[in-house]
Image (tube, rainbow, N blue to C red):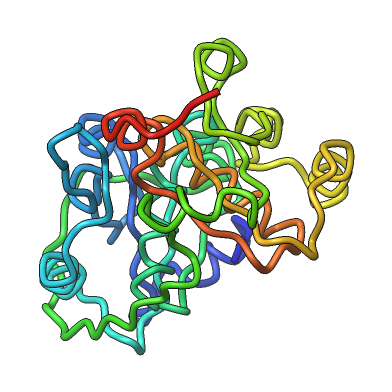
């Protein structure tokens, strides 16, 4: 899933690679990789009556990804920064809609000039394509199912300790997403560090895991950390605390 800056350099002119910059639009317009397109987190979510940031409708995603020139032949490369979990939520969205050729740049997008890459302010218009979604329900869970099966999952809270202390889902464990992000120009800590992090928190690869936070963005980052560490059975609760609390479901 993770690719290096060297990989990016080798594929800058590859017409089968779609580069998507997930940083705020003002930053994107100030300077981005040539041929990169802008994609924001607001474009891939929908709001419910509680303010939850749920995955967008299939029709909307199909039209959006198609407008970016993405079909099953294209490799999608997403770029972002370590402290902003938006890129992780967008990666998860591509995985949820079944786009297997989804990659994430391991380095911070804001450091690309340091790696010798030229930036441009020129924007490009892609040739539309037909995106064909293949929903992967194995990586998403909804509150109606989760509330009746709380004891069947290891539930991980990706928020801060202060938020956790203010109320959390029953039986959940706190692992702030910030513990696994990189501080050396990379989006994440290495696999060895992540293995040890989850081992210390008694998170077993034999169990089914559910990640949540406030809106599902930080939990998506924790989801990717688990995948990097080799965990297979991981789900995102995209409704997260906002929906759970809005529905007056039990808290500890």
Q: In the picture, residue 250 is in which quadrant?
A: top left
Question: Relative to residue 104, is residue 144 drawn left or right?
Answer: left
**Residue at 85% of width from left, 43% of height from top?**
202
Location of the N terminus (image quadrant): bottom right
**Residue at 16% of width from left, 75% of height from top?**
66
Question: Relative to residue 195, is residue 17 drawn left or right?
Answer: left
- The image shows residue 243 at horizontal and vertical percentages of 30, 37
**Residue at 42% of width from left, 76% of height from top?**
136
Front position in the image: 174 or 192? 174
Instruction: Reply above or below: 163 against 132.
Output: above
Location of the C terminus (image quadrant): top right
- The image shows residue 180 at horizontal and vertical percentages of 70, 36
Front position in the image: 144 or 174? 144
- The image shows residue 239 at horizontal and vertical percentages of 34, 44
Single out the residue that lies furthest toward the bottom: 73
**Residue at 62% of width from left, 15% of height from top?**
161
The number of callouts visible is 0
- The image shows residue 37 at horizontal and vertical percentages of 24, 56
Question: Relative to residue 149, is residue 171 drawn left or right?
Answer: right
Front position in the image: 150 or 28? 150
Front position in the image: 165 or 11? 165
Instruction: Reply above or below: 29 against 145.
Output: above
Instruction: Reply above or below: 230 against 73.
Output: above
């Amino acid at each position: 899933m993770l690719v290096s800056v060297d990989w990016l350099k080798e594929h800058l002119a590859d017409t089968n690679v779609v580069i998507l910059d997930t940083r705020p639009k003002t930053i994107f317009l100030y300077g981005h990789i040539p041929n990169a397109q802008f994609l924001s987190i607001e474009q891939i979510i929908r709001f419910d009556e509680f303010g939850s940031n749920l995955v967008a409708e299939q029709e909307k995603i199909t039209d959006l990804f198609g407008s970016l020139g993405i079909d099953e032949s294209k490799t999608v490369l997403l770029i972002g920064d370590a402290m902003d979990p938006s890129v992780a939520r967008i990666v998860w969205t591509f995985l949820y809609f079944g786009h297997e050729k989804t990659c994430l740049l391991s380095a911070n997008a804001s450091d690309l000039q340091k790696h010798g890459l030229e930036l441009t302010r020129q924007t490009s218009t892609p040739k539309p394509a037909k995106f064909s979604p293949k929903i992967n329900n194995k990586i998403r869970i909804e509150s109606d199912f989760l509330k009746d099966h709380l004891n069947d999952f290891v539930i991980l809270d990706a928020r801060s300790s202060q938020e956790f202390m203010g109320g959390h889902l029953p039986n959940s464990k706190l692992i702030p997403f910030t513990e696994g992000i990189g501080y050396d120009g990379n989006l994440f800590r290495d696999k060895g560090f992540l293995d040890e992090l989850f081992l210390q928190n008694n998170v077993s690869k034999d169990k089914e895991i559910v990640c949540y936070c406030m809106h599902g963005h930080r939990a998506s980052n924790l989801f990717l950390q688990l995948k990097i560490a080799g965990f297979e059975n991981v789900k995102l609760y995209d409704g997260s605390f906002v929906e759970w609390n809005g529905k007056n479901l039990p808290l500890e």
